[in-house]
Amino acid sequence: MLTHSTILGYPRIGPRRELKRALEAYWDGRLSRDELDRVGADLRADTWRRLAALGLCALPANTFSEYDHVLDTAVLLDAVPERYRAAADPYFAMARGADGLPPLRMTKWFDTNYHYLVPEIGAGTPLRLAGDKPMREVREARALGYATRPVVVGPVTFLLLAEPAPGGPPPLSRLDDALDAYADLLAALAAEGVEWVQLDEPALVTGAGVAEARRAYERLGALTDRPKLLVASYFGELGDALPALAATGIEAIGLDLVRGGPVDPAALGGKTLVAGVVSGRDVWRTDLDAALYELSRHPDVVVSTSCSLLHVPYDLDVETDLDPALRERLAFADQKVAEVVALADLLARGSTGTAPARSPAAAPPTSTSDTRAPYPERAASQAVHLGLPELPVTTIGSFPQTGELRAARAALAAGTLDEPGYERLIEAEIERVVRLQERLGIDVLVHGEPERNDMVQYFAEHLDGFAITRHGWVQSYGSRCTRPPIIHSDVRRPAPITVRWTRYAQSLTERPVKGMLTGPVTIVAWSFVRRDIALREVVAQVAEAVRAEVHDLAAEGTSIIQVDEPALRELLPLRRERQDEYLRWAVAAYRHATSSAGDHTQIHTHLCYSNASEVIAAIDGLDADVTTIESARSSGRILGQLDGFGRGLGPGVYDIHSPRVPGAAEVGDLLDAVLEVVPAERVWVNPDCGLKTRTYPQVEAALANLVTAARERRTD
Ligand code: GLN
Ligand code: ZN
């Protein structure tokens, strides 16, 4: 049996983001490969020591990654597309691109804010044990005196997350080849003296891969030369995959009992249950009593987290600025490890807990509260009111965030710059951005968002019910981290947030300046949310606050208000059968937030992904007058999907993710492709996303080309 407490994984960016700094220094040539490796080794050693000090019995290994654990798995299995093999550093070439070679595609890890690199697997892509990272980490831990359980992405999830090489078969058709490689991996780990291996199969909670999982674990379970197998699922319930796994020869099954709910002990077919009772997806303390109740129902159980702790910050103890009453309710990674250990202790001493209170009642349906006329009527009055040229040119909101702006924000926080001094700097920046846009000939201006550190955190800082941490960083991808705000009580807008900046920008110019807000779903998706009320209720509260801001902007005479909802798809439930219900209430919340504007106020929305197929109908349901969307990079893939979309549309014609400046002819080609599908009177000309990460020289040159391309195509 496994010992009685474990976790499925742990953060790896470093408590002070040491890995981020080391990676960036390595990429800049300021750190050698050896030095980078040493930073990684130190972080791994610190993690094992920390977990052991907290009293955890079974320590995981191979939860560290220099960039991404899915990429690590691809490299381990030699599933490296041919084009990267000649690169100086194929690993980082796949992660970030190199010498004109674009990186692998990156996408969301299930419904988290972590992003992984999508392996590309064709008929001829090797699938064989080629690396030794798990073995090396096991050895490293052993040298420090720790026996560990290596964690590897399982074969079914790995193949389900991969995409076919162009023209190739579905990666899952390569399952048998993958299983050969996993059999070799298990043999290598057995030779290393490993007792247990954890194979992560979160993809099974989406309902996919059930038959393949049965086949895979029948085969791996029947091997004689292998460590014991824990197959870990998380982010939901296993459904039909549970009986499939229970019928195989594996030794333990990991279940997410927080998201998936309680499970009948008989359903495990006598396997050890690695019981995910401490949530790895939120920052709240566990109800130990309720957890004990669930744990004590199972005869053979190991206390664990619901998923890896990758998705929460390291340590609450360093958050000394948080309200003590709030701190008492919180648990970050280390506090969650302590909870797992405490639960295992209590269980060992025979505590059985008490049945949990009922889960929160479902919220009443959100009223759509539409007060706006239907789109065609509104469009006509807006056209008169705005008097824009054909193919109007605009941007998505942010302009480059300069070093001076960041320094000013730091100085304000440190108290070396006072509020009026800071506001003068912001106003100067707004004026510069407005003048630049006028000079370039842009039709609908923005104020440039210089006052915002981040499109969600800025609003969180100005709304009641949110707390901001100082060190609560969570890895988003590679070296990138975010610091999600914590929604801890009812959300309220105590005062207008953006109105003064929009008013100031508009006072400088005759051209329309767009108001710029973040939508309710995105604010919630990029925050940690409450557990005591339903998610849709949290979204509804934020929608109410955004609605008040929309109302106040419109009352100022703001003729265009953009409410960004780039994360609309991020809260989409993993199981298909629950998605429609989610989209219904999410869309209703957006409409509620925006319908406080009058008919001649044009509402824009912005979404930033190119594969929107699941949410196309929802985009129409948002009832925005104009939708801007990523498109430049996906060679117009979105256009086919939006054929017949009957509202204003601005598919991005400038890929802001790259430092490259597209020429006017190139922009013109993309625009012509748009004009083939969308009537000219509804087309907008804009970049893919905000310009925040670009430099002024890049932005000026690219926007000038956008204006040229648009003007060449105007007929009025
Ligand atoms: N208005 C935001 C900006 O321009 C939108 C960012 C986003 O879509 N992620 O920065
Ligand atoms: Zn975007």
Image (cartoon, grey):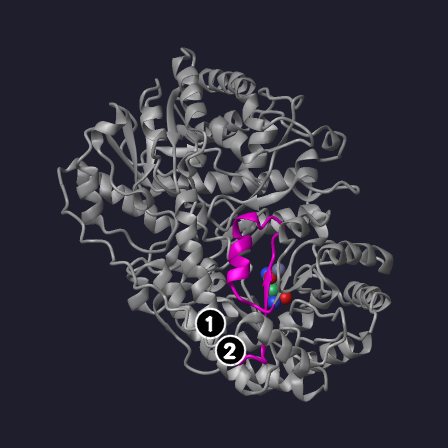
Q: Name the one closer to the observer, 351 or 545.
A: 545
Q: Quadrant of the C terminus?
A: bottom right
Disc 1 within 8 angstroms of ligand 1 (CB): no
- Disc 1 packing (10 Å; few <14; some 14–19; many ≥20): many
Q: Which residue is mark 1?
A: 593
Q: Which residue is mark 2?
A: 550
The number of callouts visible is 2
Relative to residue 543, is residue 642 depicted above or below?
Answer: above
Quick one: label 1 or label 2, which is nearer the N terminus? 2
Answer with the quarter of the image where residue 368 lies.
Answer: bottom left
Q: Name the one closer to the observer, 193 or 294.
A: 294
Q: Name the one closer to the observer, 485 or 434.
A: 434
Q: Position of residue 127 (x, y in %)?
A: 60, 21
Residue at 51% from the left image edge and 28% from the top image edge: 134
Q: Position of residue 3 (x, y in %)?
A: 28, 30
- Magenta segment includes 330: no
- Disc 2 packing (10 Å; few <14; some 14–19; many ≥20): many
- Magenta segment includes 608: yes
**In the displayed structure image, the side of residue 623 where residue 274 appears, left or right:** left
Give the secondary structure at mark 1. Answer: helix
Split into quadrants, the picture shows ligand 1 in the one at: bottom right
Q: Position of residue 580 (x, y in %)?
A: 43, 51
Give the secondary structure at mark 2. Answer: helix
Magenta range is: 598-625
Q: Quadrant of the N terminus?
A: top left
